[in-house]
């Protein structure tokens, strides 16, 4: 095809030069084809689970979901500012210029991330939390602050973490509010109130119960005759005979120190009682708390209607083991720098309130990131021989810039029963991109 009058000693050198010439010609042809495709393509993109976009499958993944699961943004925007093919630039989440095409790509990425969050939480649509009165328990407040701090630290340290993350215990933690009404038609003696908590848990992999604590608000007591008051916590049993009053069996009888004229939150362990409910859900008929002042008035709030923000809350925690291993690092993948086209991570922040994800208590926003850039000639001129071998090896596959590593996100959210859940979500926040 191309005559090369060379001696046998330089045959290999000629062959390599010829191969390099063919590769350069092939690259020019691919670049020309890609440019033509970009001009004729429409606005459809999709995101695989690894954060990579391809045409059409985004549309198919959305159509597979029920209409109620589609995510809508609560703010209006001028879609003409993000039409594919516009040459002007917009600003990214860090105030850096980016193309309108990348901005449109990020909008689609946001929708995919929100749907992925719902799937990991075993939901089809966001729960309706209209009318929810949040508990004023300081335990929940401190936990929310702790989760925000942990997530912020993960974002800051995401480039400093070790290559492998060991297996760890995932503590499934929930705060279950008291039900507004008792679900059983049992006879309850005058002067007593049954506290009922919905313990129906759909997760089959909860693991072993590790903690069960009842959080109660103690009303101010005008006169205290003694600093310690006995507390009686009883498990409710079914009536016998059926038309009789409920029966009770003592579960624990701790003492509580009372401060005069001061209301406060306090906690009691109910591990043994809740463990019985977990092993035998049908045994959950509620509990009775008795703690009276000198006039025989109930000190703790035991009715959800009396003081909604100070209603009893049951905290439970389960241990389950899971493995989280990080993939090996690949070339590229750092933060994007304006003007460069290498594979990199571009900032993408999602404010949950903007998308009506009001059921998420913490974090209020998520740093998700998106992968963008080119993977052609991964090793470039620095390692020419390696680059040639790579092109020969991948001649039937064009490398794509995609997510390689993710930062785990700890999330506090309300489920459909308005129970507070704490979960660790994976494959949501991109830590590093690479050519695959």
Image: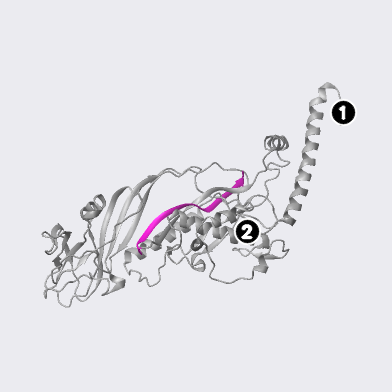
320 horizontally vs 326: left or right: left
Q: Which residues are magenta?
A: 417-436
In this rendering, would 412 be left or right of 240?
right
Q: Which mark is residue 362?
A: none
Q: Is residue 99 visible?
A: no
Q: Is residue 432 magenta?
A: yes
Q: Nearer the viewer, residue 88 or 104?
A: 104
- On the image, the x and y values in percent for residue 248 come to 13, 60
Looking at the figure, which quarter contains the N terminus?
top right
For marks 2 and 1 on the same chain, the one whose residue lies earlier in the sequence: 1
Q: Position of residue 116 (x, y in %)?
A: 50, 55
| Residue in front for this viewpoint, 27 or 114 | 114
Q: Does 157 sit above or below residue 4?
A: below
- Residue 353 lies, in percent from the top left, at 49, 68
Secondary structure of the residue carrying tag 2 is: helix
Query: In whole angstroms, how far apart are the C-alphas of marks 2 and 1?
Result: 49 Å
Q: Which residue shows up at 80% across the image and 41% down it?
A: 25
Query: Residue 329: horizontal and vertical position, in percent?
Result: 57, 43
Q: Which mark is residue 105?
A: 2
């Amino acid at each position: 095809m191309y005559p090369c009058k060379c001696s046998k000693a330089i045959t290999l050198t000629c062959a390599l030069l010829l191969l390099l010439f063919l590769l350069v010609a092939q690259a020019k042809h691919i670049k020309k084809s890609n440019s033509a495709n970009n001009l004729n393509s429409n606005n459809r993109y999709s995101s695989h689970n690894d954060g990579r976009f391809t045409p059409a499958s985004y549309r198919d993944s959305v159509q597979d979901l029920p209409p109620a699961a589609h995510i809508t943004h609560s703010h209006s925007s001028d879609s003409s500012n993000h039409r594919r093919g516009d040459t002007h630039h917009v600003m990214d989440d860090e105030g850096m210029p980016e193309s309108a095409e990348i901005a449109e790509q990020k909008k689609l990425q946001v929708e995919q991330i929100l749907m992925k969050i719902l799937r990991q939480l075993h939901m089809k649509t966001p729960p309706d939390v209209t009318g929810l009165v949040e508990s004023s328990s300081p335990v929940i407040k401190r936990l929310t602050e702790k989760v925000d701090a942990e997530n912020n630290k993960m974002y800051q340290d995401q480039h400093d973490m070790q290559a492998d993350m060991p297996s760890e215990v995932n503590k499934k933690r929930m705060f279950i509010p008291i039900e507004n009404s008792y679900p059983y038609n049992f006879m309850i003696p005058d002067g007593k109130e049954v506290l009922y908590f919905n313990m129906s848990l759909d997760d089959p992999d909860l693991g072993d119960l590790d903690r069960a604590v009842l959080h109660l608000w103690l009303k101010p007591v005008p006169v205290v005759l003694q600093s310690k008051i006995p507390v009686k916590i009883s498990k409710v049993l079914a009536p016998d005979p059926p038309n009789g009053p409920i029966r009770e069996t003592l579960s624990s009888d701790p003492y509580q120190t009372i401060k005069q004229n001061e209301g406060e939150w306090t906690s009691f362990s109910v591990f043994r009682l809740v463990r019985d409910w977990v092993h035998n859900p049908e045994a959950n008929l509620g509990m009775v708390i008795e703690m009276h002042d000198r006039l025989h008035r109930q000190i703790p709030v035991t009715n959800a209607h009396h003081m909604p923000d100070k209603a009893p809350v049951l905290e439970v925690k389960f241990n389950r083991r899971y493995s989280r291993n990080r993939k090996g690092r690949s070339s590229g993948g750092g933060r994007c720098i304006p003007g460069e086209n290498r594979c990199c991570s571009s900032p993408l922040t999602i404010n949950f309130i903007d998308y009506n994800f009001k059921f998420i208590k913490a974090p209020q926003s998520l740093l998700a990131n998106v992968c963008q850039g080119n993977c052609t000639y991964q090793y470039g001129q620095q390692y020419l021989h390696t680059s040639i071998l790579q092109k020969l090896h991948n001649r039937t596959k064009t490398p794509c810039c995609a997510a390689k590593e993710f930062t785990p996100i700890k999330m506090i959210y309300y489920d459909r029963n308005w129970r507070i859940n704490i979960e660790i979500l994976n494959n949501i926040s991109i830590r590093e991109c690479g050519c695959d």
